[in-house]
Image (cartoon, rainbow, N blue to C red):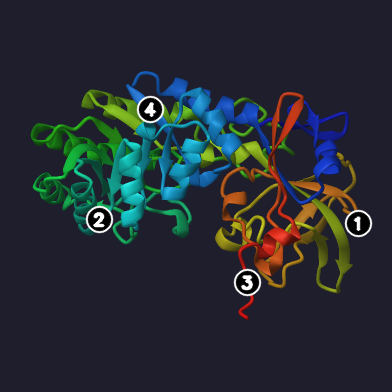
Amino acid sequence: MHSFSYVDGTLRCEGVELNEIANHFGTPAYVYSAATIRGNYQRLDTALAPLDHLVCYAVKANSNLAVLNLLAKLGSGFDIVSGGELFRVLKAGGSAARCTFAGVGKTREEISYALKEGVYSFNVESEGELARINEVAGSLGMKAPIAIRVNPDVDAKTHKFISTGKSKNKFGIGIDRAAEVYQVAANLPHLKIRGVQTHIGSQILESGPFAEAAAKLASLVQDLKKSYDIEFFDFGGGIGIVYDEALSSGSPSWWDGQGTSRRITPEDYAAAIIPVLKPLGLRILFEPGRFLVGNAGALLSTVQYVKQTPAKTFTIIDAAMNDLIRPALYEGWHEIVPLRQSSADKTTMDVVGPVCESGDFFAQDRPLPPLHPEDRIAVLSAGAYGFVMSSNYNSRPLLPEILVDGDKFHLARERQSLDDLVRGESIPQ
């Protein structure tokens, strides 16, 4: 679902006109819908109700404090991949005791910080990491809770940069070596084996890969339970969202005009895995990120110039690849719509930013209503892997983030100033 729609010809987020936000804060700017995030969380949580489960939001998707606080109030746990993300969760009112700590390169400082804060479990990616966590825990006089990330060698049928469950990916321990590595962990005195973890990739649009991964791992988990005090199985995340034409079709994200599913739904996902996971008799953790926040966000931008060449029409906007890198990095497709609804015949154009890179584009050869300088647009489904992957490339200030809740909006992050760009830098004397 999402809460962006045209009302009387003007694009709104929930009860707020996006033009009002653009007038108030300028563009480019990120806008998030609280109702969409709540709705996505609650629908997934309900679908998984037959399981003893905990939803642990993947902070890397969108780490704004207002978003984290909203999810913490809903009862969410958190999937973190750095000490900085743990710090954010704590600042937002979350608890380390409801955090799983993933990532292939945890430093000693991050491990120590997480242990002192009482992290629920480390998702361990290698034998070297087992040894390091054991060493740090021993130096603190503690036992570190761990789960080993098992790579089931499942093809998630997603973009090669966000596939994580195949043997050629850098993540986890191969399923063929998992039992051996658990024995290594059991022999380390400062570790407590708490669970088993897996994650096969991101933006997965069908239930088959999830069902395959659950089936491949269920027997391993049952075997491990016989030897170790396994409390949970962490099934990771990866549920995909709709990026294409969710708004212009007049349909919410999961449905077409006839009420049939266009993509995997929470109910599809649950139906594929619950029959396999429920008999395990364990708490099941889930780590959705994009699914909860992706369709909840839009990037607002203003047209600066329209440039005609013999080959192309270039619509140049004030947002750039440093603000939203998905199209350049992943060939990510985002729907683009004007803030004022148009019935004019569409024309084919490239929508590009001002950064000095040919890769600085949001759409290529895209049929869109005619756009003119000072027209405002929204790049939709930008709530995940948008602001969090932004940078100051070309010395462009980071954007503001605004959270809409009903008919009210809150500035969740200020726009950077030019002074902010050089803060902390110095010239040698």
Q: Residue at x 81, y 62 (%)?
A: 316
Q: Residue at x 39, y 19 (%)?
A: 49
- Amino acid type, mark 2: Glu
Of marks 4 and 2, which one's residue comes earlier in the chain?
4
Of marks 4 and 3, which one's residue comes earlier in the chain?
4
Q: Position of residue 28 (x, y in %)?
A: 76, 51
Of marks 4 and 1, which one's residue comes earlier in the chain?
4
The residue indicated by pointer 4 is: 54
Q: Residue at x 88, y 41 (%)?
A: 343
Residue neighbourhood size for the residue with mark 1, other residues' Cα within 10 Å, grouped as few (<14), some (14–19), many (≥20): few
The residue indicated by pointer 1 is: 373
The residue indicated by pointer 2 is: 129
Residue neighbourhood size for the residue with mark 2, other residues' Cα within 10 Å, grouped as few (<14), some (14–19), many (≥20): some
Q: Are marks 4 and 1 in contact (CB under 8 Å)?
A: no
Q: Nearer the viewer, mark 1 or mark 2?
A: 2
Q: Nearer the viewer, residue 125 or 109?
A: 109
The residue indicated by pointer 3 is: 426
The kind of secondary structure element at disc 1 is loop
Q: Residue at x 72, y 24 (%)?
A: 406
